[in-house]
Image (cartoon, rainbow, N blue to C red):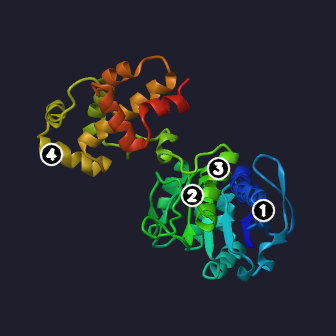
Amino acid sequence: MKTIACLVYPGVMSLDVTGPMQVFASANVELRRQGLPEAYALVLLAQAAGPVATSAGLRLYADRAFESVAAAELDTLLVPGGSSDLEQCANTALLDWLKTCAPQLRRLGSVCSGALILASAGLLDGLVATTHWDDVAALQCFAAVNVQGDRLHTFDPSGRNGHSHIFTSAGVTAGIDLALALVEADLGRPLALAVARRLVLFLKRPGGQAQFSPHLAQCNGPTSRLTELLEWIAAHLDADLSLETLAARANMAPRTLHRVFLSELDTTPARHVERVRLEAARAMIQSGQMSLQNVARLCGFGHVESLRRGFQKTLGVSPQAYAQRFGR
């Protein structure tokens, strides 16, 4: 029996807690269906035992105060995000307890902006980490953390593309993806797949969280050297936007324009054009008002196949799948 604990605090996101915990509870249900003993005991920890108001106004009941719990009693601890996560980042009692427990826990993970709490405790230093797309910039303020903003989670039992001891997950429902991965590691793929089917979920969701974020083309603010050119690019996506054309438009040598893009936007002209075209295509597909052929033509991809390659490369899904998921 593995004890799975989840931290709760005033303003915690209710789904950050209940989503992953339901996955473990459903794993117990599937085991019982197969005549096998349950694998998980679930517990909620808080500053003090008792009801805790979530950001939704609902109350969750904490079983115990976290400071009364020894790490040896737990197998896995999850730290969720919430509206008051920044207050928890300054909660010295919590941070000290996490630092004490971390080396003794088999697994320590975060959901959504809970990564900021782990980072504040210094537990993500030198590790790959992710968080909700809107909190990526805040997590990047921790210079010792290798932030990868388009990951759904960083749990990897092999240790090749993440970590099996301390790990993080992206926004809200990505905590469910993480919990399914933990169940798969504990109990095998067939059991995890049975849980995913029972909860009507993907066992492994296609793509990362970039497909949900509205900031695909977000970049550092340009100076006046590029402002006019960037506005022109956005208004002429179906035009020839080669490096030579853009350089002539900006009255710069191609090599100079390339250096200016790297310096001011931390990307190349070609990559910027690709991102802006993809962002425009995504908005058109979400509107549901035109065919993919027209989207490809108006956004400068030329053909649907080129649009498909761009979607697969950046968002991890096809335009058709994106339209089914997000289109009106």
| Classed neighbour count for the residue bearing mark 3: other residues with Cα under 10 Å, few (<14), some (14–19), many (≥20) | many
Residue at screen point 75% across, 73% down: 1
**The label number, if any, that marks residue 35 in the structure image:** 1
Rendering coords of residue 42 (x, y %): 78, 65
Rendering coords of residue 326 (x, y %): 54, 31
Q: Nearer the viewer, residue 84 or 242?
A: 242
The residue that label 2 is drawn on is: 169
| Classed neighbour count for the residue bearing mark 2: other residues with Cα under 10 Å, few (<14), some (14–19), many (≥20) | many
Residue at screen point 31% across, 42% down: 223
Q: Tell me the SS state at disc 3.
A: helix
The residue that label 3 is drawn on is: 196
**The label number, if any, that marks residue 51 in the structure image:** none
On the rendered structure, is 52 left or right of 16?
Answer: right
Q: Tell me the SS state at disc 4.
A: helix
Q: Does the residue at mark 2 contact the one at mark 1 (Cβ under 8 Å)?
A: no
Q: Tell me the SS state at disc 1.
A: loop
